[in-house]
Image (tube, helix red, strand yellow):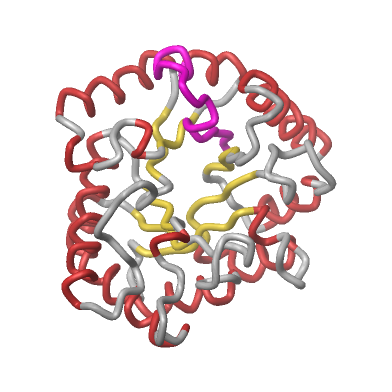
Amino acid sequence: MKLAICNETFQDWPFDKAFDFARECGYTGIEIAPFTIDKNAKNITSTQRNEVRQQAEAAGLEVIGLHWLLAFTEGYYLTSPEAEMRARTADYLAELATLCRDLSGDVLVLGSPQQRNLLPGVSHEVAMQHAADVITQALPTLEKHNVVLAVEPLGPAEGDFLLTADLGAELVKMIDSPQVRLHLDVKAMSSESTPIPEIIKKHAGITAHFHANDANKLGPGMGDIDFIPILKSLQDANYTDWVSVEVFDYTPGVETLAQDSIAYLQKCLAEL
C-alpha cells in the first residue's frame, strides 16, 4: 500500500510548501481537490496545470488524481431529473478527467454530496438511474485518458444518496465499465452496521481507492477507530493502491494532522 494525503489539508499553504512538507512527512502521493486551484476546473489554464504537476514532481510526489469533484461549483447535479443538467454535469466530469490526466493522475473520487442528494420527488432508485446516466455520458473521456471514476458512498451525516458500500457497488454494476469502480472511506464505512473489515473484503474486487480518516473527522489514529484490522483486510485483499489521508476537522493544525496521521499508519503497517 502507498500512503498519500489530500492537498486541502494544507489549507492556505502554497502548493510548493505543502508538497515539500508532505514528502518530508513520508507521503509519496498527493490527492488534489480541484477547488484549491480554481472553483471552476474549466478556468484552470494549461500553465496552471503544468505548474501544479511540476511542483508535485519536484517534491517527489505522485499526483493520484482528484476528489471533491463538484464542490463549490454551480450548475451541476449528479442525480437531477433534468436531462440538460445531467448532460452539463457529464461534460464537467469529462473536463475533470482531462484535468486529472494533465496533472498525471488517474483517479477521480466522486463524492460531493451537496451535488447529488435526493431532490424533491426523486426516489433513490430513480436517482441511481440519473447518476448512472451522467457517468455513462462521461465514459468516452474517462476511457480516452485511462482515468478511473471511483464512486464514493458517504454516511447519513453528509446526505441521503448512496449511503452504503453496497449501494456504491450497485451503481458501479449498473454502469459496467472498468473505468468506473468503488471508493471506500473509513469515516463513511463507520456509519454502517457491517464491520469495516467485512465491507472491505466484500468489495475488494472493485475497490479502486481508499480514504483513511476517523469517524470524528480527524486523521487516522486521532479517534477510536483501530486501523490494524482495516489495513489487514486491505492486505488480505491484495490491495496495493493508495491509502490517502482525508480529514475534515483542521483544529489540530496542518503539521500535526499530516505528521501524526502517517506516523500512526506506518506504525500499524509495521505491526502487521
Can you give x and y, in whole percent of width and height, for residue 73 in the image?
Answer: 31, 50
Residue at 19% from the left image edge and 77% from the top image edge: 83
Tell me what residue is drawn at x 54 percent, y 15 percent. 21
Q: Nearer the viewer, residue 3 or 236?
A: 3
User: How many numbered dots are placed on residues in this image?
Assistant: 0
Q: Is residue 12 magenta?
A: yes
Q: Is residue 84 above or below residue 66?
A: below
Measured along the vertical axis of the image, is residue 16 above or below residue 198?
A: above
The C terminus - image quarter: top right
Left or right of 142 on screen, residue 64 = right
Q: Quadrant of the N terminus?
A: top right
Give residue 87's position: percent from left, percent from top: 18, 68
Residue 167 position, x and y percent, is 53, 76
Front residue of 102/133: it is 133
Residue 135 located left or right of residue 185: left
Compared to 58, does 8 lie above or below?
below
Q: Which residue range is magenta in the image?
A: 1-19
Which residue ends up furthest to the front in the rendered image?
120
Residue 252 location (% of width, % of height): 71, 26
Q: Is residue 7 magenta?
A: yes
Examine the rendered structure and indicate whether residue 46 appears above or below residue 14.
Answer: below
- The residue at 45%/62% (across/down) is 151
Indicate the quadrant where residue 126 lies. bottom left
Please name the residue shown 56% across and 40% down the image.
244
Given residues 200 and 187, the one toward you in this image is 187
Q: Quadrant of residue 90?
A: bottom left
